[in-house]
Amino acid sequence: MQPLASYQQLIADYFESLAVIKEPRNLYEPIQYILSLGGKRMRPVLTLMATDVFDGDCKKALAAATAVEVFHNFSLVHDDIMDDAPLRRGNETVHEKWNVNTGILSGDAMLILAYQHFEAYEPEIFLELAKLFSKTAIEVCEGQQYDVDFETRDDVTLDEYLKMIEYKTAVLVGAALKMGAIVAGTSAENANLIYDFGRNLGIAFQLQDDYLDAFGDPATFGKQVGGDIIENKKTYLYLKALEFASPNEREQLAHLFSIQPADNTDKIHSVKELFVSTGAAAATQEAIKNFTFKSFETLAQMDIHEDKKAMLQAFGEKLMNRKV
């Protein structure tokens, strides 16, 4: 395995080689824009890393890694439209910089472009990658729909919420790793185990993302802090607050999540106070820790050298060490 920066550089160079603005420019410029914002590019890094873990050539996984990243960014473009989000990675979202119709169409094109990257592989590998990708893509859509549905439901359970974030976020992390395993040609057991490692880490990551949405620093988080509260999203924080709240606190929380004021400053502040006072903030941090440890337990079952297990765990720890 290589240092994280090496994988990121490989991906950056590969993306640079693919960067071509074609006509119509209003279709392709937004695609180039969202991909150029970069971010940590965690998912394609995982694809390359998994290929190395199972003794494959990570450069052969670049096309699969790119497919994962293009699909992920397609989902962000459409999510931002649905959430009416003004910022992504500290920059204007595509629909704000252009318009909603452009965001929808450019996002559609990105989904198709993602599939095209699998054409770099031989038929047997292509089939495995495409089947995994299709399964993952529809699960991501299902997760997004659950997320939307939960905004208007008052009876969302913790189990339902965890299923939603598994589909919306975690399955793509698992798939990114499994794609690297498929390209490397490792056993089905190893491929499934590294998928589970990524899936549990992805759940932990999304729980942490929800926590940071409420308590993060706008300068380092890169998105609008309090966005989930504004959208009345039934996050783990919210559901835990309901579980732990006194009757009076529960009434306050229900009221706050039923209103949409023109200025959300007071609403965000009041909800955050309830998240802390009920113990929901602490419970969410504990859940993040538990799912992270669950992912690490999966590593013990993999048929790989111990130093590679240690490096995967170190990556997971680094990933989860985001600051508020």
Image: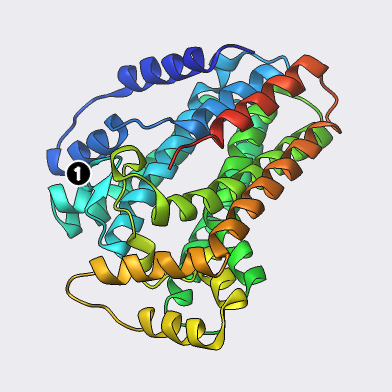
Please name the residue shown 34% across and 30% down the image: 38
Of 42 and 112, the residue lying toward us? 42
Image coords of residue 209 (percent x, y): 47, 49
- Vertical position of residue 163 compared to residue 18: above or below: below
Helix, strand or loop status at disc 1: helix
Can residue 251 be seen here? The reply is: yes
Q: How many numbered circles are shown?
A: 1
Display colour scheme: rainbow
Q: Which amino acid does label 1 sit on?
A: Leu
Spot occupied by residue 163 in the image (x, y as percentages of width and height): 63, 63
At horizontal 28% and vertical 33% (from top left) the residue drawn is 37
Direction from residue 281 to residue 17 in the image, left or right: left
Image location of residue 267, percent across then percent down: 30, 72
* Position of 234 relative to 288 (above/below): below
237 or 148, which is in the foreground?
Answer: 237
Image quarter in which the N terminus is found: top right
Residue 201, picture quadrant: top right
**Visible in this render: residue 130?**
no
In the foreground, 47 or 127: 47
Extreme residue toward the front, this view: 277
Left or right side of 132 for 276: left
Q: In which quarter of the image is residue 241?
A: bottom right
Circle 1 crowding by C-alpha within 10 Å: few under 14, some 14–19, many from 20: many
Give the labeled residue for mark 1.
Answer: 27
Residue 317 % position (x, y):
62, 31
Q: In which quarter of the image is the C terminus?
A: top left
Q: In this view, does 278 lie to the left or right of 113?
A: right
* Image height of 51 relative to 93, above or below: above
**Residue occupying the point 52% across, 49% down:** 208
- Residue beneath the point at 66% across and 35% down: 178
